[in-house]
Image: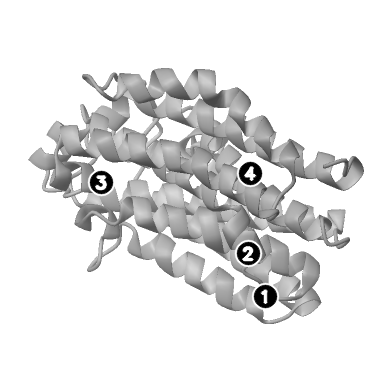
Amino acid sequence: MFSTRAVGHPRGLSVRTAFLSARPWSFTMTFSSVTLGTLLAALEGKADLLLYFLTLGGMVAFHAATNILNDYFDVKHGVDKEGAPTTRYRLHPGAEGEVPLSTILDFSLALYAVTLAAAAYLALVSGPAILIITGAGVLGSVLYTSDPVVLKARGAGEVTVFVMWGLLIPLGAYVVQTRALSWVPMVGAIPVGLFVALVLLANNIRDISYDGSVNTRTIAVRLGERTASRVYGWLLALAYIIVLGEVLSGFVSAWSLLVLLTLPGAVPLWKMFRGPVPDDADPKTAALALQFAVLYMVSLVLSIYLPVF
């Protein structure tokens, strides 16, 4: 299925093309969700590094599979094609006609197989709940762009990624470590999940004109740029408010106030969305999301080793 031939060969994916088409820069979101769920388990004295890395590997494969399948169906539906906005920002071999769609689909299915293999092993170690959580995530991943549902085109994209990266992945990572279902990882990961949704919302606001022209009714298209930009600002503020609420309620320690160090970057973003949205709106949001998540995770580590608050 894979080759080491140069990019653009019509018969297969080169290693470089396969890697870049999986959008590896987006894996920081999966790293944050898995690590957050694991750290919340570690706060309860339960953490196994081997299980953590197996979970992370399985979820990175899941994220890559989701990205590749998204590209496959977007090309199939005529959303992504040569000259589309997404082709200006990243490598997209399907839209550029460099790789057959059947090869792209095979690549995605192979990555899903890696995910399911990791889930099967972890289920043997930590219980069958892992299979249920993984199955729910794969279902959401497939329905995101596949027929006949196409959640992305129905304005449910942001909700879908929030549920997967803000609820299911942290919960799965937590269950792997503790072997117990709990609301703790889902509540703890809400702020990070909101940022994942914000990255997608920023992308969709930027692409409103194009998405509307190809009948992709994202939430940004449905609301219009002005209202969607306001929603962006509300969700951005909500992520910080939730952390403050978690600290005041004692859910997390005062170390988590470290996330407030990202406010100097959040305020300009909030102001930016009050005017014309620039082309780099989503990478700027992603950069802030990573800074926020890292400080949030650092605060949990400090809560474990320096529980002074």
Q: Earlier in the sequence, mark 2 or mark 1?
A: 2
Q: Nearer the viewer, mark 4 or mark 3?
A: 4
Q: Which residue appears at 66% of the width and 35% of the height?
A: 257
Amino acid type of the residue that numbered disc 4 sits on in the rendered structure: Ser
Quarter-wise, where is residue 119 in the image? bottom right
> Which circle's residue, 2 or 3, is located before the other in the chain?
3
* Residue 11 image label: none
Q: Of 79 and 150, which appears nearest the observer?
A: 150
**83 versus 18 height, above or below:** above
Residue at the disc numbered 4: 32
Q: CA distance from mark 1 to mark 3?
A: 38 Å
Q: Position of residue 117 (x, y in %)?
A: 66, 68
Compared across the picture, whether 127 is left or right of 284 comes to right
Under mark 2, the amino acid is Leu
Determine whether, in the image, residue 296 is placed left or right of residue 63. Answer: right
Residue 256: give x, y in percent of width and height: 69, 39
Q: Residues within 10 Å of mark 3 (few under 14, many from 20)?
A: some
The Cα atoms of the two marked residues, 2 and 3, are separated by 32 Å
Question: Extreme bottom residue here?
Answer: 128
Q: Earlier in the sequence, mark 1 or mark 4?
A: 4
Q: Which mark is residue 171?
A: 2
- Residue at 57 percent across and 36 percent down: it is 15
Residue where numbered disc 3 is placed: 75
Numbered circles on residues, count: 4
Element type at marker 2?
Answer: helix
Q: Is residue 99 left or right of residue 168?
A: left
N-term-proximal mark, 1 vs 3: 3
Cα distance between the residues tagged 4 and 2 = 13 Å
The residue wearing badge 1 is 181
